[in-house]
Image (cartoon, helix red, strand yellow):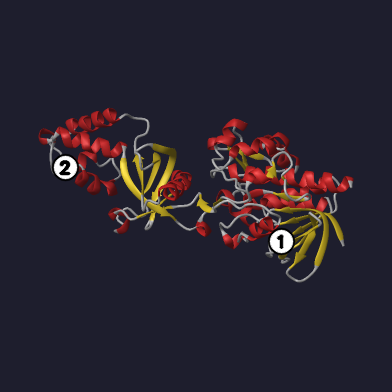
């Protein structure tokens, strides 16, 4: 049988590509190698599905550090406002939370997936699960269809590759799309983990003394070998048995990876600022005031509410302060050292967890070989790409899913326009 459009991959971008092609009247087949659709979508946003982010376009692009400028093209066709309207039209009411994150009022990712599946059914889009693709067929310099692992050959006017990257392989993203892209002449840029916990070999990590300690509203920064700050991110974090995790850490992770790749260094310096809204002098003054207010009390007990208790032994040791010292005997130099630590606590990162343990894959199909306004290959007519298979990645907080929905919609729309007119 011949289809106008075959979409490979039943994840976020694939579902949207199939829908946008179907909305234009194309005869669409959606192929998914696993037994379920939208598996990554179901675990996004902690299972609540952060469908997009309400920030202005320029801000959105700043939050897509992996080639975000490319998204001006897809966003000119289908952007975050369009995503919001799309879901509202499907009966999914959305609410805005902190930092512009948009969630369904139901707080359930399943309601988002169910709405997409209803839309697919409404446009008579054929769905096939447990249908792994062996390869995309290219004949006489253009797309001809696909061949399934079962041996079945399917003809198509256009093919959309929307199979994800190599992260979270349990959702079906195992890097299948890269070989199909290369067979069409595409370049695959180096793959690396992003939005992934950071590893460290510091003694306080190795001895697990801080494991499970959460910190709120800190700033974590990454520094290069020349002592220049590469990036900083504000948010929450947690100490783990292998290093650090949490939103601020995930956002810094790709910069640790890039710095290691660039310099070949074994470790990369990070700094933790516990009081980003205060200067070092503010912190120092506050410590002195606390001590002066209770001059007879041991310093350890004075400072207990100011610094998380589990950090106290480490910070007192690093600033060479005795636990039992009282206000009258507090050495000024050591209080300055303590304030310095609270504003710039050094942590050496040894790397990150693996790409399979990352939430997002960095690298992928080279964007110079893709037309941004259509998502079509510049090398193989009739071949389209969407989502994480591309060298595109954003931070968590609704940015990656926005890229997936936007590129998926644009790819499906243009694949349909090309084939339905033929």
Q: Is residue 70 left or right of residue 324?
A: right
Q: Which mark is residue 321?
A: 2
Of helix, strand and loop, which one carries label 2? loop
Residue 84 visible at all: no
The image quadrant that residue 324 belongs to is top left
- Who's the residue at 19% across and 33% down the image? 291
Q: Which mark is residue 375?
A: none
Task: Return the residue nearer the eye: 339 or 97.
Answer: 339
Which of label 1 and label 2 is nearer to you? 1
Q: Are marks 1 and 2 in contact (CB under 8 Å)?
A: no
The image quadrant that residue 368 belongs to is top right
Q: Is 39 drawn above or below residue 220 in the view shown?
A: below
Count how many numbered circles sit on residues in the image: 2
Local crowd size for mark 2, using a 10 Å CA cut-off: few (<14), some (14–19), many (≥20): some
- Who's the residue at 83% across and 60% down the image? 155
Question: Which image quadrant: the N terminus?
Answer: bottom right
Local crowd size for mark 1, using a 10 Å CA cut-off: few (<14), some (14–19), many (≥20): many
Residue 380 visible at all: yes
Task: Return the residue nearer the eye: 123 or 193.
Answer: 193
Of the two numbered discs 1 and 2 on the same chain, state the one appearing first in sequence.
Answer: 1
Q: Which residue in the structure is indicated by mark 1?
A: 32
Residue 224 in picture, x, y percent from top left? 38, 42
Task: Return the residue nearer the eye: 306 or 172.
Answer: 172
Looking at this view, name the residue that lies furthest to the left.
Answer: 329
Of helix, strand and loop, which one carries label 1? loop
Q: Is 50 drawn above or below residue 154 in the view shown?
A: above
Residue 379 in picture, x, y percent from top left? 72, 49
- Who's the residue at 41% across and 53% down the image? 351
Separation of residues labelled 1 and 2 (CA atoms): 61 Å
């Amino acid at each position: 049988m011949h289809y106008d459009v075959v979409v490979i991959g039943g994840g976020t971008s694939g579902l949207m590509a199939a829908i946008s092609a179907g909305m234009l009247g194309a005869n669409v087949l959606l192929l998914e190698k696993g037994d379920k659709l939208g598996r990554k979508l179901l675990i996004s946003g902690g299972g609540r599905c952060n469908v997009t982010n309400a920030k202005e376009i320029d801000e959105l692009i700043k939050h897509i550090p992996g080639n975000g400028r490319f998204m001006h093209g897809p966003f000119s066709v289908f952007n975050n406002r369009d995503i919001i309207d799309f879901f509202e039209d499907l009966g999914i009411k959305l609410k805005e939370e902190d930092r512009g994150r948009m969630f369904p009022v139901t707080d359930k990712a399943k309601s988002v997936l169910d709405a997409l599946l209803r839309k697919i059914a409404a446009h008579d889009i054929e769905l096939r699960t447990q249908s792994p693709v062996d390869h995309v067929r290219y004949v006489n310099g253009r797309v001809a269809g696909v061949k399934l692992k079962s041996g079945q050959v399917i003809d198509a006017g256009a093919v959309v590759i929307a199979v994800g990257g190599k992260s979270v392989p349990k959702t079906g993203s195992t890097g299948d799309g890269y070989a199909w892209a290369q067979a069409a002449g595409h370049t695959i840029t180096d793959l690396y983990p992003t939005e992934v916990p950071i590893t460290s070999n510091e003694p306080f990590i190795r001895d697990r003394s801080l494991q499970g300690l959460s910190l709120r509203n800190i700033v974590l920064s990454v520094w290069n070998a020349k002592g220049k700050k590469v990036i900083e991110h504000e948010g929450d974090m947690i100490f783990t048995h292998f290093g650090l995790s949490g939103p601020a850490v995930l956002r810094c992770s790709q910069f640790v990876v890039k710095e290691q790749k660039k310099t070949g260094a074994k470790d990369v310096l990070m700094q933790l600022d516990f009081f980003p809204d205060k200067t070092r002098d503010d912190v120092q003054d506050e410590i002195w005031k606390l001590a002066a207010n209770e001059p007879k009390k041991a310093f350890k007990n004075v400072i207990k509410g100011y610094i998380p208790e589990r950090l106290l032994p480490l910070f007192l040791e690093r600033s060479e302060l005795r636990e039992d010292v009282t206000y009258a005997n507090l050495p000024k130099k050591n209080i300055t050292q303590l304030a310095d630590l609270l504003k710039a606590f050094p942590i050496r990162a040894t790397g990150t967890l693996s790409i399979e343990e990352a939430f997002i894959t960095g690298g992928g199909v080279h964007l110079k070989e893709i037309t941004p306004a259509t998502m079509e290959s510049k090398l193989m007519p009739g071949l389209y790409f969407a989502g994480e298979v591309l060298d595109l990645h954003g931070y968590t907080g609704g940015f990656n899913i926005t890229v997936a929905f936007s590129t998926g919609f644009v790819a499906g729309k243009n694949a349909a326009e090309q084939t339905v007119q033929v």
